[in-house]
Amino acid sequence: MHTLFPVQNSAKNGHLDANPDSDVEAVQWSLINHLVECFLLEQWVDEHLIQVKTTTEYLANHQTSQAQDAHQFLASLPQQYQDFFDQDNSLIVMKLEQDRQLLLLVEPAYASQWRLSKSCLPVVHNKHHVDSALLEPVSSAQHLLDIFLSMMDSAALSDVGVLKLKESLEASFIAQQQSSLANITMAVCQYPHWHQTLIAAEQWASLMDRPFHPLAKGKLGFTSQEYQRYMAEFNQPITLVWVAIAKSHLMVADHFKDKTIQNPAAYLLDATQQQKLMRELDDKGIADTHIAMPVHPWQMTHVVDDMYADDLASGTVVALTFEALITYASSSMRSMLIDTDTPNSIKLPIGVYALNSKRYLPALKLINGEKNQAILMQARKLDPVLSAQLRLWDERLWWGYMSPSHLHDKSAINPYFYQEKPTHLGAMLRQLPVDLCDDTIQLLPMASLGMLVYKQGVSHHIFDGIVQEGIDSTTQNSSQNSAQDSFQEGSPQNKKLAVIACFKNLCDVFLGTMLRCLRLGFAPEMHGQNIVIVLKDNRFTSLLLRDHDSVRIYLPWLARHQIADPEYLSPPDFKNRLYRETPQALIFYLQSLGLLVNLRAIIESLVERYHINEETLWHEAMTSIEESLVTIDFDDDQRQILRDELLSNSHYPHKTLLLPVIARGSDPHGSMPAGESKTINPFKRVKKSASQRTHLTN
């Protein structure tokens, strides 16, 4: 059986212990699986080219036309394919040419109608197979992508976009192979200090990056060596380099109150480091005219030296010899964490393409992030439960390169907001709530909970450590056993019950908090990299949000609670997409990112690790929503809309991922390309199964 989680982590001294070919196959199957899902959900081709049959029907049709029995027809395929056809499974048949068909061997799914069977790859059926096999499995995502593209109208495709898609897919394949060598810790929740746990959990979150996105791991701009140096799963210390920028060219956040600490060093460096930095500024005669700024070492080498060459020559930007502040990458790559007991961390621009967008740091987005943080802070005052369960990284302090003539212009008509150069040199400070910098607390990006790591063929999940305390109360394991040993030896049924209870606790906190946000008229960014969940005494207690520039709002619901229009900045004559025009458009983010990406990844990882029935976990999520709709003080119209959109409607909106890459072409936009299609409501199968069980018992 193939795994949804291809990171085998059987590395030893930088080499794979297992057969490297099997790891390549695992990565390819995972990419193919996600590619098939995108192809079907994004409707790359007309529906008339796609037929759903059973394997029995297909073999019967083939037998008639070819005068062969099923055994002869399947003889060239491995045994698992023959078993699949023997069991009368569903089969998607797509016409490629007059004499060729693509067979997708599928099974029913929850977040989409079909998903690729874990036992098999797609198969090309060559009816006239003079130069090729009659039945030939498609063993690479690159080959499958070529097949899919051949089915489309080439005149409607951007050649540049197609090349970008192929380049990104190849980069993602290579990156996943590299990530399989990362030495990932298994004891995330056993670290003594909170900051160690966060850094370790970010390693896990980075392994899958954004779940279900075939291009997620491809970082265009990194060499192989840079990838292993700068990605979070490799846990490499990254020492930041520093430049000094003339104050005449530096825009700063309005939130700065103390004008004496308008520099990052005051927040990030200890007293000795600050003194060393100031000595260099004094020696260069720029202590009063410039502010020292940290720069990611990749950015300095690949972007700053070239893009800011004139500024470096004129002295507007001064490269410093000072190098200090050891950081560790988070799963988002450009957010740098410090391995010490400090609430401060830093977000820096990196001109690398990830998800086909450059990871720079535009002042316009930082300003909109300030506006959104004001909404989030106001919301916490309006709802006592949100006050306890919605925690915020403070993102109101930032610095950014800017032309002197527009230094104080924070209006939407500042033309430099829409140029690329100013976005590549700047920094945003992140400050944790001080009470969360506590060694009795673990901070876990939700993306880390949607990941399995295999070590010597055995899977591991962060829930292993979280649920251990509950398992200990029902087992006879001695106190000398390690947590992992105890977990492996506990009662299978107790393990499952403990995991289900832990997942329900997670759903109650995550879904309950997000629904309270929707009630007030806004939707935070909900994918697992942006939300860090707070764990205390083996219970999830609250959510910690970061990247506030992605909060979306629906003004009529905000107005009900006297939350004013934030008046987002956006290009003239362009409606900022942070505004949503309908309640349904706001709820879309809970459906797509919250449920179909974030929670789905966690569900599928728990199913694979603990062999829990998948429907059981979707049912727990549904129950959390139902309970929240009763207990939260929604207006009647809100409650009905939410019930319809989340539970009653047969379909959910779905984010498209790959076709927008083709459409965008070479545009170096700062956000990932995406569109919208539709998929089935993941609770549809849950309700149908429950209804069938009720019918059978009556």
Image: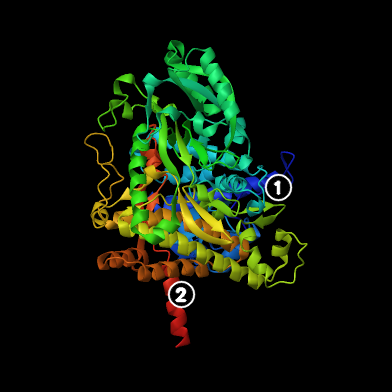
Check disc 2 and report its element: helix, strand or loop: helix
- Residue where numbered disc 1 is placed: 10
Image quadrant in which the N terminus is located: bottom right
Residue 134 visible, this orientation: no
Disc 2 residue crowd, few under 14, some 14–19, many 20+, Cα 10 Å: few
Mark closest to the chain's N terminus, 1 or 2: 1
Residue 479 visible, this orientation: yes
Q: CA distance from mark 1 to mark 2?
A: 39 Å
Pick the front one: 496 or 502: 502
Pick the front one: 66 or 510: 510
Kind of residue at disc 2: Ser
Q: Position of residue 633 (x, y in %)?
A: 32, 67
Pick the front one: 207 or 430: 430
Identified at 30% across, 50% down, the residue is 553
Disc 1 residue crowd, few under 14, some 14–19, many 20+, Cα 10 Å: many
Kind of residue at disc 1: Ser
- Residue where numbered disc 2 is placed: 689
Check disc 1 and report its element: helix, strand or loop: loop
Residue 121 falls in which quadrant of the image? bottom right
Up/down of 73 relative to 88, above or below: above
Q: Position of residue 421 (x, y in %)?
A: 39, 24
Q: Position of residue 202 (x, y in %)?
A: 57, 46
